[in-house]
């Protein structure tokens, strides 16, 4: 699971440097979390043993699962709250986009 954290940090840095916008990093984190959750939901529905073992071993269930795996105590609480506020920020941008698209 260490490689997942390393890849995630590198991907966040690349997205931040490429787009040079905090909003893009928030979108990226939202997209990654949705992908992780979809993988695990798909595996739960399909139930093919080899694929299930691979996904359960190498793909985290969510960004919160990554935070919980690598931190404890007050650091864990702070990181979970940061993630929560990033989700709220992501949701606000999605709602703004939805309303602007409607006009």
Image: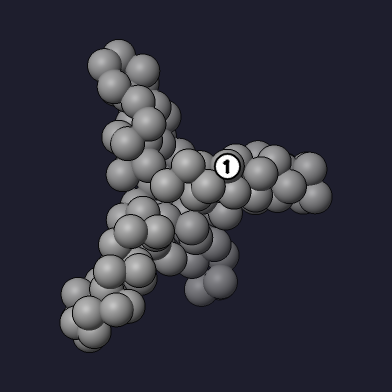
Residue 42 visible, this angle: no
The picture places residue 89, in percent across and down from the top left corner, at 47, 42
- Vertical comparison of 94 with 25: above or below: below
Residue placed farthest to the front in the image?
50
Residue placed farthest to the top in the image?
74
Q: Residue at x 40, y 59 (%)?
A: 58
Q: Quadrant of residue 21?
A: top right
Residue 56 visible, this angle: yes
Q: Which one is in front, 86 or 5? A: 5
Q: Residue at x 48, y 58 (%)?
A: 32
* Quadrant assignment for the C terminus: bottom right
Q: Which one is in front, 73 or 93? A: 73
In the picture, measured across the screen, residue 26 lies left or right of residue 79, that is right
| Colour scheme in use | one colour
- Vertical comparison of 76 with 98: above or below: above
Q: How many marks?
A: 1
Query: Counting other residues with Cα less than 10 Å from the Cα at mark 1, is it few (<14), some (14-19), or many (20 or more)?
Result: few
- Vertical comparison of 23 with 100: above or below: above
Q: Residue at x 66, y 44 (%)?
A: 10
- Vertical comparison of 48 with 103: above or below: below
Q: Quadrant of residue 53?
A: bottom left
The picture places residue 14, in percent across and down from the top left corner, at 73, 47
The picture places residue 34, in percent across and down from the top left corner, at 40, 62
In the picture, measured across the screen, residue 26 lies left or right of residue 36, that is right
The picture places residue 90, in percent across and down from the top left corner, at 47, 49
Residue at the spot of label 1:
6
Give the structural element (helix, strand or loop) at label 1: helix
């Amino acid at each position: 699971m260490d490689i997942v954290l390393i890849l995630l940090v590198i991907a966040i840095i690349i997205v931040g440097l490429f787009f040079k916008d905090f909003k893009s990093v928030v979108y990226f984190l939202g997209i990654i979390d949705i992908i992780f959750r979809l993988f695990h939901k798909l595996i739960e529905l399909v139930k093919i043993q080899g694929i299930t073992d691979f996904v359960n071993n190498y793909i985290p269930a969510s960004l919160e699962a990554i935070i919980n795996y690598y931190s404890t105590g007050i650091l864990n609480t702070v990181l979970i709250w940061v993630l929560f506020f990033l989700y709220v920020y992501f949701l606000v941008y999605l709602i703004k986009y939805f309303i602007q698209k409607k006009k």
